[in-house]
Amino acid sequence: MSKLKEVHITDSNLRLENNIVKGGILPNKISELTRTVTVAGETIVEGPLYAARLSIEAAPLEVTGAVFAQQELYVNSNVVGNVTFRKAVGSATSIVSRAAGCQTTFCSDVNSKSIDLNNAFVAGSIYGDEVVLENCVVVGGVFATQSLTIRNCVVGTFISPFVEIAGNIHLLLPSVFSVESVNYAAGTHLYSLALADLGSLYRHLPQAAESGKIEINLESDDLRTTLTDGGQQRTLHSYSVVGKVLAADLIDTDKFQNHFLLTAAALGPQLLKTYDLGTDADGSPAVLSTERIRAFFFDILAGKVEIQDLDGTFSIEQFARTM
């Protein structure tokens, strides 16, 4: 890292390049509520950042506090490098990061009316009206109040009135929901990793024999589900392998260590120490850092980490004997 110089906030509009900001960037007077913050080079902000518009023209950038952009948070399409937000990020209007060469990492939740991300890692959940994700990893859920488009992603789960998916979609939980039937392109595959041995794969060890991914059939696994809240009812389409997961009571899923992996990803910045999953294949600790977890899930997306298929069928007689 190059030597950064400390900057003191005095201008209504800021251009940061090779700077380290102590204490964050927050408005002190009304004129600063319309401030535009432009990142033109290597920058570290040690605290929260508020701007009417946050424009990222170059990397690396790291913000250790919460970020809010009143109008827009925008990462230029030609940015190459790491852009890391350690805490929650929000915008009243839009959050856009579609630079294929930029490794954008959100260590907490992302919230905006319009969200459009490419090659991004979100350790928390996404909340928005219109959400578009391509080649992304979201450890939590994706909750869109109007529409959701997902292409080649790993997500925990999702719910939206209108959903379009394409490519290979991997789910960390057994079920997803939509008000209308999910629209999907030809060649689309939806997999649940709820019974995959992610812990062994993370440590570069052989997968357990009774583990693997289960493909959700977008036609036959479409169930109508009614949710009741007080006097209100809502009917949704549910795409799920939860029955197969429940039937897998005959599998000891705790030994997969998936919950440790996902919890460490979601709580990364809040943990007071770095944990590990035990010993890696080479004898070194399998450290649960945000950077390594990010790389692991993107290796799954790229096909570098191959998850074996698990037969979703089961015997009623065998299940009865187990119970």
Image (cartoon, grey):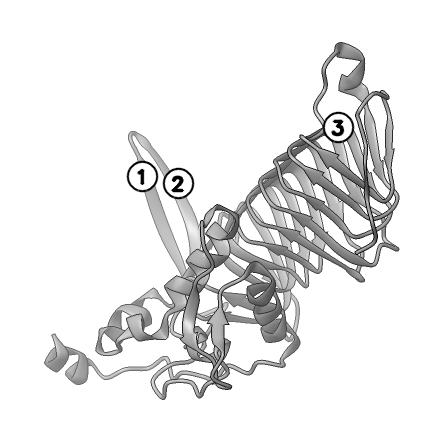
Direction from residue 61 to residue 245 in the image, left or right: left
Residue in the foreground of this view, choosing between 63 and 98: 63
Looking at the rendered structure, which numbered label has been put on residue 178?
Answer: none
Residue 188 seen by the camera = no
Circle 3 is placed at which residue position?
A: 51
Q: Position of residue 83 (x, y in %)?
A: 73, 51
Q: Earlier in the sequence, mark 3 or mark 2?
A: 3
Q: The residue under label 2 is which amino acid type? A: Arg
For the residue labelled by badge 1, is the local secondary structure a helix, a strand or a loop? strand
Residues at circles 2 and 1 in contact by the CB criterion of under 8 Å: yes
Judge the density around disc 2: few (<14), some (14-19), many (≥20) Cα neighbours within 10 Å: few
Residue pictured at 55% horizontal, 43% vertical: 109
Circle 2 is placed at which residue position?
A: 234
Residues at circles 3 and 2 in contact by the CB criterion of under 8 Å: no
C-alpha separation, residue under disc 2 versus residue under disc 1: 7 Å
Residue in the foreground of this view, choosing between 105 and 114: 105
Q: Position of residue 294 (x, y in %)?
A: 60, 64
Q: Which mark's residue is nearer the viewer, 1 or 3?
A: 3
Quadrant of the rendering where the N terminus is positioned: bottom right
For the residue labelled by badge 3, is the local secondary structure a helix, a strand or a loop? strand
Looking at the rendered structure, which numbered label has been put on residue 228?
Answer: 1
C-alpha separation, residue under disc 3 versus residue under disc 2: 38 Å
Direction from residue 256 to residue 73 in the image, left or right: right
Q: The residue under label 3 is which amino acid type? A: Ala
Give the mark count: 3
Q: Position of residue 92 (x, y in %)?
A: 67, 29
